[in-house]
Amino acid sequence: MSKPRRSQDRQDYYYWKAKKEGYRSRAAYKLIQINKKFRLIKEGDRVLDLGASPGGWSQVAVKFGAEVVAVDLNPMPPIEGVTFVRGDITKNETFRAVREICDEFDVVISDAAPKLTGKWTIDHLISIDLARASYNFAEEFLRYGGNFLVKVFQGEEIEKFYRDVSKNFRFKKMHSPQASRKRSAEIYFIGKGFKKNRGPVG
Ligand SMILES: C[S@@+](CC[C@H](N)C(=O)[O-])C[C@H]1O[C@@H](n2cnc3c(N)ncnc32)[C@H](O)[C@@H]1O
């Protein structure tokens, strides 16, 4: 067996760690690291996990003591403590499906990502659309004072996205956890203390 190249060392480290510790994805460590630093999710929280499959983040949120509603285009094998909705986060019918389960969340997290085309600008623009769709869920379902985490691929639209979304949170930051690949375009927006009052539901 050939040795992993140096640039792949970290990726392989989290891949094997996830296998060993029973997480479905190496992405689980991104949420663990982000939560350690920013304390977004705590015991008893209701968490909405968007772009959730195969379920690493949902597993982590359950481990933190949260109750989770998870949404993805792809199926996701069951996890105790997680209600799964198969749907597209850009579609209204998915809002309705989530609302049938729960109409308010303490935390909205989104690791939703497009299938990569390899063309930086296209991947960036699709990722911004998904991040905005995720924010729409936050607007609809996040309680006053709640927390929001969303992945975005870096590019020219990120500043505008940051401006639009960050004004609605008391604390806001862009952050790249150690478990993200070194040369990855991904970065996470973290918003704490949602400032908006949600309108009447229904
Ligand atoms: C990087 S994976 C998420 C990994 C997950 N956080 C974990 O820890 O297992 C990105 C997910 O986003 C989902 N996704 C992409 N576009 C979506 C959309 N429009 N609606 C719902 N899910 C979407 C993909 O199906 C994929 O499962």
Image (spheres, grey):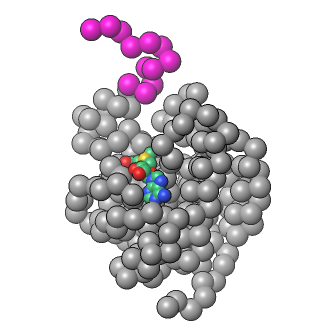
11 sits left or right of 80 in the view: right
Residue 128: x percent and y percent? 63, 53
Q: Is residue 155 something that shows in the picture?
A: yes
Residue drawn at (34%, 64%) of the image: 86
Give the quarter of the figure containing the N terminus.
top left
Q: Quick check: is 182 in the magenta stretch?
A: no
Residue 10: x percent and y percent? 45, 25
In the image shown, does 156 or 38 lie closer to the viewer? 156
13 sits left or right of 156 in the view: left
In the image shown, does 112 or 40 lie closer to the viewer? 112
In the image shown, does 186 or 68 lie closer to the viewer? 186
153 sits left or right of 178 in the view: right
Residue 179: x percent and y percent? 48, 36
Quadrant of the rendered image containing residue 67: bottom left
Residue drawn at (60%, 74%) of the image: 139
Instruction: Give the number of marks.
Output: 0
Residue drawn at (59%, 70%) of the image: 136
Tell me which segment is drawn in magenta. Answer: 1-12
Residue drawn at (64%, 35%) of the image: 120
Quadrant of the rendered image containing residue 130: bottom right
42 sits left or right of 143 in the view: left
